[in-house]
Amino acid sequence: MTFGDFEQYFSATRINRYLVATNHSKEKTVKLYKANLKIAQAFHPLLGIFEVVLRNNHNEPICFVGNTINFSNALEVYNSINKILTWINPKLLQLISDLDNVQKTIIIAKQT
């Protein structure tokens, strides 16, 4: 596949961020895009598990009541997700802890 085909199939707009990240190296852009696909593939089963658990445990909408947001169940959902991550691999929770500000956001939102 030529780079032109690659851009056409995946869209120049999408590919541009990879070009910028690789200093406009077409070869490195394709490699980076493929690496990103592998990362996405690794998360796909995890997302499927979350979807099943959330759907099975929460028959009602989780955070929305009409046009307003209800955070009463959000912390319970957050804790369920953390338990699942720990069950899958205890290191996963450690890896995302630095990026996680969800619990703080939920607590602040419940106070307002």
Image: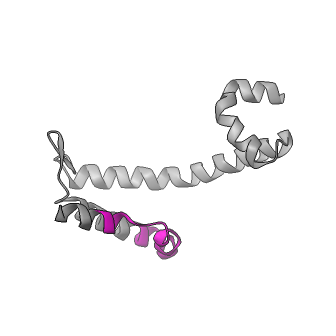
Instruction: Say which quadrant the N terminus sits in.
Output: top right
Quarter-of-image position of residue 110? bottom left
Depth check, front residue: 88 or 30: 30
Secondary structure of the magenta portion, mostly? helix
Depth check, front residue: 3 or 66: 66
Identify which residue is drawn at 35% across, 49% down: 51
Locate residue 79 relative to residue 6 in the image: left or right: left
Q: Position of residue 30 (x, y in %)?
A: 78, 41
Q: How is the image coloured?
A: one colour
Identify which residue is drawn at 25% across, 65% down: 108
Q: Position of residue 63 (x, y in %)?
A: 22, 50
Quarter-of-image position of residue 104? bottom left
Count of labels in the image = 0
Locate residue 31 relative to residue 92 in the image: left or right: right
Instruction: Say which quadrant the C terminus sits in.
Output: bottom left
62 up-or-down from 8: above or below: below
Locate residue 86 relative to residue 111 in the image: left or right: right
Q: Is residue 90 magenta?
A: yes
Magenta range: 85-105
14 up-or-down from 90: above or below: above
Identify which residue is drawn at 85% across, 43% down: 25
Identify which residue is drawn at 30% across, 55% down: 53
Locate residue 3 relative to residue 73 in the image: left or right: right
Q: Is residue 30 magenta?
A: no
Q: Position of residue 90 (x, y in %)?
A: 47, 76
64 up-or-down from 109: above or below: above
Q: Position of residue 111 (x, y in %)?
A: 18, 65
Most extreme residue toward the front is: 112
